[in-house]
Image (cartoon, grey):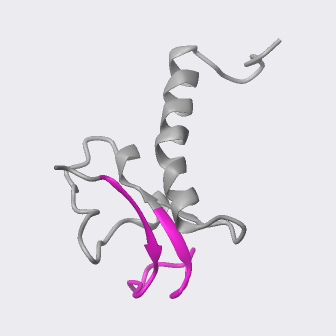
């Protein structure tokens, strides 16, 4: 079964990575990558561009943080379908 999102700890960085450091607790949002063919997030280790990572807040467990991925994606899709943009309100 394909898997797109995961949480974990950064163990290695390429020489171009600058936003994060080793031992950062992260989530990757591979499902947000347009036409992503990278369905490998059930692997022990993955490689991903750093613009698809988010730092885990200290007050959340890995389980709580992992549960946010689908909620965030659903919220983004809802806002896009509602044609939300600058100057528009979500709730009145």
Residue 73 lies in the magenta-colored region: no
User: Does the magenta stretch mainly form a helix, a strand or a loop?
Assistant: loop
Q: Is residue 34 above or below residue 91?
A: below
- Identify the residue shown where x is 56% and y is 80%: 24
Closer to the camera in the image, 16 or 10: 10
Which part of the image, by quadrant, shows the C terminus?
Answer: top right
Q: Position of residue 2 (x, y in %)?
A: 20, 50
Q: Is residue 53 above or below residue 2?
A: below
Q: Is residue 85 left or right of residue 70?
A: right
Residue range in magenta is: 4-27
Residue 19 lies in the magenta-colored region: yes
Q: Residue 34 falls in which quadrant of the image? A: top left
What is the number of callouts on the image? 0
Q: Is residue 5 above or below residue 75?
A: below
- Identify the residue shown where x is 45% and y is 58%: 52
Closer to the camera in the image, 66 or 34: 66
Q: Position of residue 89 (x, y in %)?
A: 77, 17
Q: Is residue 43 left or right of residue 88?
A: left
Q: Is residue 88 left or right of residue 29?
A: right
Q: Is residue 31 left or right of residue 67?
A: left
Q: Residue 38 falls in which quadrant of the image? A: bottom left
Q: Is residue 27 above or below residue 72?
A: below
Q: Position of residue 75 (x, y in %)?
A: 56, 31
- Identify the residue shown where x is 49% and y is 32%: 74
- Identify the residue shown where x is 58% and y is 23%: 79
Q: Position of residue 54 (x, y in %)?
A: 55, 62
């Amino acid at each position: 079964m394909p898997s797109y999102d995961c949480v974990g700890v950064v163990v290695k960085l390429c020489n171009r990575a600058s936003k994060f450091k080793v031992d950062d607790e992260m989530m990757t949002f591979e499902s947000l990558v347009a036409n992503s063919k990278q369905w490998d997030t059930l692997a022990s280790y993955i490689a991903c561009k750093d613009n698809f990572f988010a730092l885990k807040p200290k007050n959340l467990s890995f389980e709580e943080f992992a549960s946010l991925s689908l909620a965030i994606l659903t919220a983004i899709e809802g806002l896009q379908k509602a044609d939300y943009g600058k100057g528009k309100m979500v709730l009145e």
